[in-house]
Amino acid sequence: MILLTSPVQVGNLILKNRLVMPPMATSKAENGKVTPDLIRYYQEKSDGGALGLIIMEHSFISAEGQASANQTSISSDEDLAGLRELTAAIHANGSPVFAQLNHAGSAAKEEVTGYVPLAPSALKHPKAKDDRLPKAMTAQDLEKVIADFKEAARRAQAAGFDGVEIHSAHGYLLNQFYSPLTNHRMDEYGGTLENRIRLHCQIIEAIRSQVGAEYPLALRLGACEGLANGSTVEDAVSACVQFEKAGVDLIDITGGLGGYVRPGHSEQGYFQDFSAAVKQAVSIPVLLTGGITEAAAAEALLQNGKADLIGVGRALLKDSDWAKNAVCAVQ
């Protein structure tokens, strides 16, 4: 049986195949708003309906959580009209689409947002190019972030997205809470893994209370730190078990503070040891991305139990026909 072209269920949504376009920032938004250029981009990528799922590039949930100048916003009801146009364009081509909700944390820049960046602790971000420190989040800051994720999920549902993904990877805020390298808090949000994912679980609970039990909810975890004394594969497995219990329908495995690459690894699916370990511990589907450029490699990863879905990013970015060709190649 060919797995890549076989259906898979995510929450109450049945995907026609297991090929996913993962979130990739395009910087095509203007003042947070969807532009015709952004809609054309997603129309081109979804043309032909060969993708089982598209996860849109990260959208900021609040002004202080914006990661870059031309990032898409889901922080205001004023964003809804453009987001509805975008989801309609993708749906017209036959693919479902999730919104990815994100807060940049200390990866935000004050010159972009107008705010001093927020973080779990007042520590320099591993990729920071200057010595300015972020502000350690207060209890009020945490309450606001939870509320902002909840409101962003409400907007995603109202805008026609088929589900939402919580971004806890690539060195952004929730990844900063997850990693012991950036979370030195002494309260109930720091220290043990249970404490470091407390905010994640509270956000999952808040989103569930807003969108209901049936609306698909994914979480992208920066499982592979790639840095000394960072989080471990055991942390990833334990965290994902808790995320499933909290109400997540899909786990999306990628890199952490080190970003979406893995130094010293060039094999296709280079986070596969993490995704395979998580897959063995949870009953919900697991998505793997990371350097996958060939349909045969994608199929082999599925057949070998490394994941349930395959995300192909850079290859699809370079060639919009990649998905159509891949589906044909494995049939």
Image (tube, grey):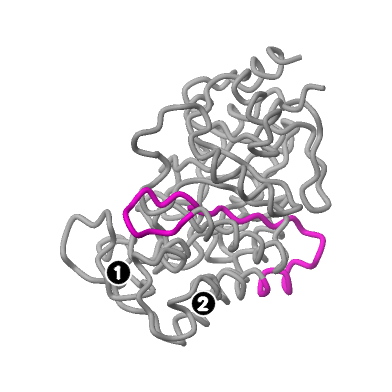
Q: Quadrant of the N terminus?
A: top right
User: Does the magenta segment cover residue 238?
Assistant: no
109 relative position to 195: left or right: left
Percent coordinates x, y for residue 194 in the rendering: 55, 74
Tell me the residue that label 2 is attached to: 195
Say which quarter of the image contains residue 306.
top right
In this orientation, which residue lies closer to the viewer: 151 or 78?
Answer: 151
- In the structure shown, which secondary structural element does the residue marked by tag 1 occupy? loop
Along the polypeptide, which appears first: circle 2 or circle 1? 1
User: Does the magenta segment cover residue 208?
Assistant: yes
Percent coordinates x, y for residue 229 in the rendering: 34, 59
Tell which tag, 2 or 1, sits nearer the viewer: 2
Q: State which region is magenta.
A: 205-232
Mark 1 burial class by Cα count in 10 Å: few <14, some 14-19, many 20+: few
Residue at x 50% of width, y 51% of height: 58
In this orientation, which residue lies closer to the viewer: 297 or 76?
Answer: 297
Mark 2 burial class by Cα count in 10 Å: few <14, some 14-19, many 20+: some
Tag on residue 114? 1
Identify the amino acid type marked 2.
Asn
Residue at x 38% of width, y 74% of height: 120
In this orientation, which residue lies closer to the viewer: 317 or 298?
Answer: 298
Percent coordinates x, y for residue 161 in the rendering: 69, 51
- In the structure shown, which secondary structural element does the residue marked by tag 2 occupy? helix
